[in-house]
Image (cartoon, rainbow, N blue to C red):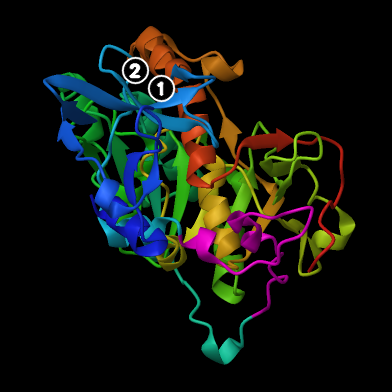
């Protein structure tokens, strides 16, 4: 409801039928508006005892995976109706604040997200007089992990941190619900007094919302975000990541994982189709010109892997992750940081191991048998395409284009 109010405020129009005899919806004079009701998660319109549902159309067919530019129409409710999520207006506007940035329209980029096309300056060292150094990493850093019914992987990660640092860090694990794990697993979780293990109230909480919950619970200045199948070691060099955040104006220091995500991103019009697109250039930032002189092996980037240490306040300030994007959330948080001109660095010598059977690493039988791998894969697999569309729609672009082997593609500062 509040989203429609916002649209009305901007366009001075209301939702109605484009023409008298058509079913396509658009913005019309408010005297011609139609009444829409929310029923069972869908928007419906009743006329002469006939109930029609609001649905997105792709190639004139109802779809549950709409793309930018698709039309909205009234269809039979037997078809795939649009799922409706109500958001508070303030949350909606803050969530999409990056799309309100000023931008200069040109042939290469002529849509709102183009306002994020800038590169943050390289990090600066803070004055020693203004620097509050962290004496104990356990006083300043909390670990945040989102898992999906894989508690033994989270426990393995906790053990690797304990072994590496010879101490425990506060750890917040957010799990999907709603059921508790077997007593023997809950007992093992209880062996880690520094671990706060939260089981959600629903089955499919989503990575983004889980991480948001975790970060909001953090009481320390920094947190380290890790996937549940990560393992840290002395090669992760968490003290170095902490030192960089302590002594510079960086917002985030990313480590190197199995997949090298580090790179730059930019919005532009696709040269082939002319449609709006997000261009992603993996590896483009790992060049000499982007290397930090004070920290060899660390580079100014737009994007790193999901293993990173960050300032808690900075992640909260950009609104965290988009909660409706349950997976495929990776680029979202980094685009938010980029839009806010927060500084991000990738360190290829801070190595985080990604150890899982899905990644070619054989696990022990206890971990392998502790969760339903078929259900886990089905949930993720079935969501990839849908969440990819959700992510693109969130940033108001039609395509994500990955370009390999193109170094330093941006031309502006």
Residue 322 percent across, percent down from the top left: 41, 47
Residue 97's label in the rendered image is none
Secondary structure predominantly adopted by residues drawn in magenta: loop
| Residue extending farthest left | 49
Q: Give SS at disc 2.
A: loop
Looking at the image, the residue that sits furthest to the bottom is: 129
The x, y position of residue 53, in whole percent, is: 26, 25
Residue count near mark 1 (Cα–Cα under 10 Å), binned few <14, some 14–19, many ≥20: some
| Residue span colored magenta | 97-125
Q: Is residue 283 left or right of residue 344?
A: right
User: For mark 2, does the 10 Å Cα neighbourhood hold few (<14), some (14 to 19), or many (20 or more) residues?
Assistant: some
Q: Which residue is mark 1?
A: 64
Residue 102 in view: yes
Tell me the number on the disc at residue 80: 2
Q: Position of residue 19 (x, y in %)?
A: 39, 35
Rendered location of residue 39, percent (x, y): 15, 30
Q: Are marks 2 and 1 in contact (CB under 8 Å)?
A: yes
Q: Quadrant of the C terminus?
A: bottom right
- Front-lying residue, 69 or 233: 69
Q: Does 78 sit above or below residue 70?
A: above
Task: Residue 217: name its quadrant.
Answer: bottom left
State which quadrant residue 33 falls in.
Answer: top left
Residue 120 lies in magenta, yes or no? yes
73 shown above or below 27: above
Residue drawn 57% across and 30% down? 354
């Amino acid at each position: 409801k509040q989203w429609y109010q916002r649209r009305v405020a901007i366009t001075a129009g209301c939702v109605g039928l484009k023409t008298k005899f058509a079913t396509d919806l658009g913005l019309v004079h408010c005297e011609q508006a139609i009444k829409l009701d929310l029923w069972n998660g869908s928007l419906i319109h009743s006329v002469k005892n006939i109930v029609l549902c609001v649905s997105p159309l792709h190639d004139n067919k109802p779809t549950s995976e709409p793309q930018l530019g698709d039309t909205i129409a009234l269809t039979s409710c037997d078809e795939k109706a649009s799922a409706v999520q109500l958001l508070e207006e303030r949350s909606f506007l803050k969530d999409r604040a990056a799309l309100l940035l000023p931008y200069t329209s040109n042939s290469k980029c002529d849509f709102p997200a183009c306002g994020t096309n800038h590169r943050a300056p390289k990090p600066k060292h803070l004055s020693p007089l203004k620097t509050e150094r962290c004496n104990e990493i356990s006083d300043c850093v909390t670990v945040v992990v989102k898992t999906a019914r894989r508690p033994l992987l989270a426990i393995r990660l906790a053990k690797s941190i304990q072994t590496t640092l010879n101490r425990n860090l506060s750890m917040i694990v957010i799990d999907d619900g709603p059921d508790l794990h077997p007593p023997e697993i809950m007992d093992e979780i209880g062996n880690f007094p520094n671990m706060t293990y939260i089981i959600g109230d629903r089955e499919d909480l989503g990575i983004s919302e889980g991480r948001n919950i975790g970060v909001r619970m953090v009481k320390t200045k920094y947190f380290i975000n890790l996937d549940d199948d990560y393992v840290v070691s002395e090669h992760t060099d968490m003290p170095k990541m902490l030192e960089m955040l302590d002594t510079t104006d960086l917002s985030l220091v990313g480590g190197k994982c199995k997949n090298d995500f580090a790179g730059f991103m930019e919005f532009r019009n696709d040269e082939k189709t002319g449609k709006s697109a997000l261009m992603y250039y993996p590896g483009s930032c790992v060049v000499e010109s982007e290397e930090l002189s004070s920290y060899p092996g660390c580079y100014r980037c737009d994007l790193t892997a999901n293993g990173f240490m960050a300032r808690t306040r900075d992640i909260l300030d950009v609104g965290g992750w988009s909660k409706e994007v349950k997976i495929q959330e990776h680029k979202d948080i980094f685009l938010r940081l980029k839009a806010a001109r927060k500084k991000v660095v990738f360190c290829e010598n801070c190595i985080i191991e990604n150890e899982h059977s899905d990644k070619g690493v054989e696990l022990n039988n206890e971990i392998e048998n502790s969760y339903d791998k078929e259900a886990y894969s089905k949930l993720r697999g079935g969501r990839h395409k849908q969440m990819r569309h959700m992510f693109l729609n969130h940033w108001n672009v039609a395509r994500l284009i990955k370009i390999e082997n193109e170094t330093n593609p941006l031309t502006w500062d």
